[in-house]
Image (cartoon, rainbow, N blue to C red):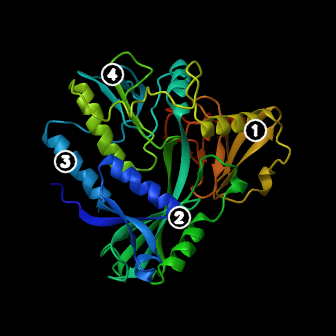
């Protein structure tokens, strides 16, 4: 067993009576155990009263778990190459940015958050067959100090909009004792800069109203997740390839369980074994609400893509004056017929790039929280100076040197 502070805990979902009844029925249908309970509404349980309690949950240290998996992989003869960027994946090999080619014996697996692509044609096919079934979202989290033992160690979730999830990290705070990790305030990725709210303060305020022992904030962060309309991941053989080419994406934020499930489904497929979940999570599955002859595109993907195209084509009426931009900030500005992404660094120097995502040309938007550029269509992320951080794009933003300092 991997030493990763694995701790079995109870899980609780707070919702309306109607939702709790439906969830309990769904749990029973899946063979899992869940029952409605009343936690009493005390501050040690975040004011939770009537809720659904389900067994079989656990918390762990994800970094220790990942390191343990890596060590086990290497011990079995595997090799891991960090800081090695793949630019062209194919059915039986991958090619790195440096031009090195690695050939696979039994299959290539893309577990890259969102599947990367090898060229424009591959990007277009994958957008219709895979990317269109999911959409990128941005989720936030804060860690708050709590007195040791003041919060019942469990996993908490609600069905508010936006929803929240909470867990306790025991013994993580040297000053007080435990940490309360609160996640939520989720929204579509790639919204306009002015649409952002103070997500971290909102999470802290919400948590302190529920768990009155919560004290100062010690950490805050955000990350990209890929959701499908039916909230089921896409794990298995890629619908764009005839060979042994597999993808794992669309885990809807259920990273550990989704990754484990993807590993089971894909490894069984490579070994020629049947897996009971393969069809349910198949990347080739058709969306039930889409007519058979139409491409399987989710509602949210269509909305985000259309919005981006309109923003890209329409003139930008309220243009930001680059000279008035604050240091360490970015903005998309109109320069003639072109949209330009401009970042002004701490010293006031301007860095200009094409505002079109190098993946398929959607309009990139500045993320003021993380100081990076985000694509609303397929989820690519780029640093403030244009370096690719997250796929499906494998290219950096295109610099416009004549507009830079």
Question: Which residue is under mark 1?
Answer: 311
Which of 143/368 is in front?
Answer: 143
Question: Which residue is under mark 2?
Answer: 16
Whether residue 76 is visible: yes
> Farthest residue in the top direction?
242
Which of 118/269 is in front?
Answer: 269
**Between disc 2 and disc 3, whose residue precedes?**
2
Secondary element under disc 2, as helix, strand or loop, is loop
| Gap in angstroms between the C-alphas marked 3 and 1 | 47 Å
Question: Which residue is under mark 4?
Answer: 93
Whether residue 404 is visible: no
Whole-percent x and y of residue 105? 23, 21
**Between disc 1 and disc 4, whose residue precedes?**
4
| Gap in angstroms between the C-alphas marked 4 and 3 | 24 Å
| Gap in angstroms between the C-alphas marked 2 and 3 | 44 Å
Of tags 4 and 2, the one toward the viewer is 2
């Amino acid at each position: 067993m991997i030493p990763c502070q694995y701790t079995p805990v109870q899980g609780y979902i707070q919702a309306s009576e109607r939702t709790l009844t439906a969830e309990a029925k769904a749990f029973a249908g899946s063979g899992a155990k869940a029952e409605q309970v009343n936690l009493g509404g005390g501050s040690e349980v975040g004011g939770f009263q009537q809720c659904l309690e389900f067994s079989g949950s656990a918390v762990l240290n994800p970094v220790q778990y990942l390191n343990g998996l890596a060590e086990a992989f290497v011990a079995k003869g595997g090799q891991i190459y960090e800081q090695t960027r793949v630019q062209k994946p194919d059915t039986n090999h991958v090619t790195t940015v440096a031009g090195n080619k690695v050939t696979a014996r039994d299959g290539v697996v893309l577990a890259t958050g969102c599947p990367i692509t090898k060229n424009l044609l591959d990007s277009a096919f994958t957008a219709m067959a895979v990317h269109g079934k999911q959409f990128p979202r941005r989720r936030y989290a804060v860690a708050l100090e709590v007195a040791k033992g003041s919060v019942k160690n469990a996993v908490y979730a609600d069905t508010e909009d936006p929803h929240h999830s909470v867990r306790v990290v025991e013994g993580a705070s040297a000053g007080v004792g435990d940490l309360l990790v609160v996640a939520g305030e989720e929204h579509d990725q790639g919204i306009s800069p002015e649409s952002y709210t103070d997500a971290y303060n909102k999470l802290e305020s919400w948590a302190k109203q529920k768990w009155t022992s919560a004290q100062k904030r010690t950490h805050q962060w955000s990350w990209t997740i890929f959701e499908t309309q039916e909230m089921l991941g896409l794990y298995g053989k890629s619908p764009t390839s005839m060979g042994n080419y597999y993808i794992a994406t669309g885990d809807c934020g259920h990273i550990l369980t989704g990754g484990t499930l993807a590993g089971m489904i894909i490894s069984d497929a490579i070994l020629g074994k049947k897996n009971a979940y393969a069809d349910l999570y198949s990347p080739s599955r058709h969306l039930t609400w889409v007519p058979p002859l139409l491409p399987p595109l989710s509602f949210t993907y269509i909305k985000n893509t259309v919005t981006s195209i309109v923003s890209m084509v329409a003139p930008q009426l309220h243009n930001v004056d680059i000279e008035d931009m604050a240091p360490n900030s970015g903005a998309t500005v109109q320069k003639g017929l072109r949209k330009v992404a401009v970042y002004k660094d701490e010293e006031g120097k301007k860095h200009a790039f094409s505002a079109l995502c190098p993946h398929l040309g959607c309009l990139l938007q500045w993320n003021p929280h993380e100081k990076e550029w985000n694509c609303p269509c397929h989820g690519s992320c780029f640093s403030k100076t244009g370096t690719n951080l997250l796929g499906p794009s494998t290219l950096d933003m295109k610099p416009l040197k004549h507009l830079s300092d």
